[in-house]
Image (cartoon, rainbow, N blue to C red):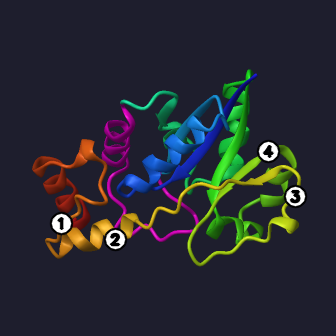
């Protein structure tokens, strides 16, 4: 069985932290493959300010094109919305019976996992990797057996930070992956977030 780690998110837009985390997980041998699961609509986030899903997908594809065993997926685009992780996992198990799926989530999401749709069912059926987020301490003694806290580096960037900086015409070269760091793409992102 191939082990697939799902790293879901809006990627609105993708940034160096997303890419660094994906690389960390595959290089540490924590998975056979990592799929960046671009979410068309996250049920826990408001959709205003959300860039077009195909545009977010294409940015993610560019950002990780040269990283071995990191794949960008539009699997959720064909599922009912909003995108509930439980439903996605059920659909993936049917579509890929020879794979096992585990989730990669931030400590912030782990601390509100009880609010996730059918979170208890997800925990019963799947492993989770939890990465650190500043300001969200995780008590390692309280983690279930199938939840592993990984000692990934802290990446201090956010997609919100990029969008806000671009609206103020500030430099985002420290935050954007190098593959997206050109005038044409930055202009496109700026146009998308102003729509």
Judge left or right: residue 106 versus residue 9. Answer: right
What kind of element bears circle 4?
A: loop
* Dot label at residue 71: none
Residue drawn where x is 37% and y is 30% of the image? 66
Mark 2 vs mark 1: in front: 1
- CB of mark 2 within 8 Å of CB of mark 3? no
Q: Tell me where residue 99 appears, x and y as whole percent.
A: 72, 26
Q: Between marks 4 and 3, how big is the CA–CA gap?
A: 11 Å
Mark 4 vs mark 3: in front: 3
Residue annotated with mark 2: 161
What kind of element bears circle 3?
A: loop
Q: Between marks 2 and 3, how big is the CA–CA gap?
A: 33 Å
Residue range of the region highlighted in magenta in the rendering: 40-65
Query: Which quadrant would residue 11 be assigned to in this image?
Result: bottom left
**104, above or below 69, in the image:** below
Q: Tell me where residue 40 appears, x and y as whole percent.
A: 46, 51
Residue annotated with mark 3: 144
Quarter of the N terminus within the rendering = top right
* Dot label at residue 171: 1
């Amino acid at each position: 069985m191939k082990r697939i780690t799902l790293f879901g998110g809006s990627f609105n837009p993708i940034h160096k932290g997303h890419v660094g985390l994906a690389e960390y997980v595959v290089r540490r041998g924590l998975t056979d493959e990592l799929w960046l699961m671009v979410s068309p609509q996250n049920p826990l986030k408001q959709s205003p300010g959300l860039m077009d899903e195909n545009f977010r997908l294409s940015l993610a594809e560019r950002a990780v094109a040269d990283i071995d065993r990191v794949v960008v997926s539009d699997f959720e685009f064909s599922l009912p919305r909003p995108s509930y992780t439980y439903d996605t996992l059920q659909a993936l198990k049917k579509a890929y019976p020879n794979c096992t799926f585990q989730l990669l989530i931030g400590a912030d999401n782990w601390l509100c996992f009880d609010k996730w749709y059918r979170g208890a069912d997800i925990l019963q059926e799947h492993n989770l990797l939890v990465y650190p987020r500043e300001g969200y301490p995780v008590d390692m003694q309280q983690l279930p057996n199938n939840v592993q806290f990984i000692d990934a580096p802290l990446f201090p960037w956010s997609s919100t930070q990029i969008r806000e900086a671009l609206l103020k015409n500030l430099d985002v070269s420290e935050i954007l992956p190098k593959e997206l760091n050109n005038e044409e793409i930055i202009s496109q992102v700026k146009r998308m977030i102003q729509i």
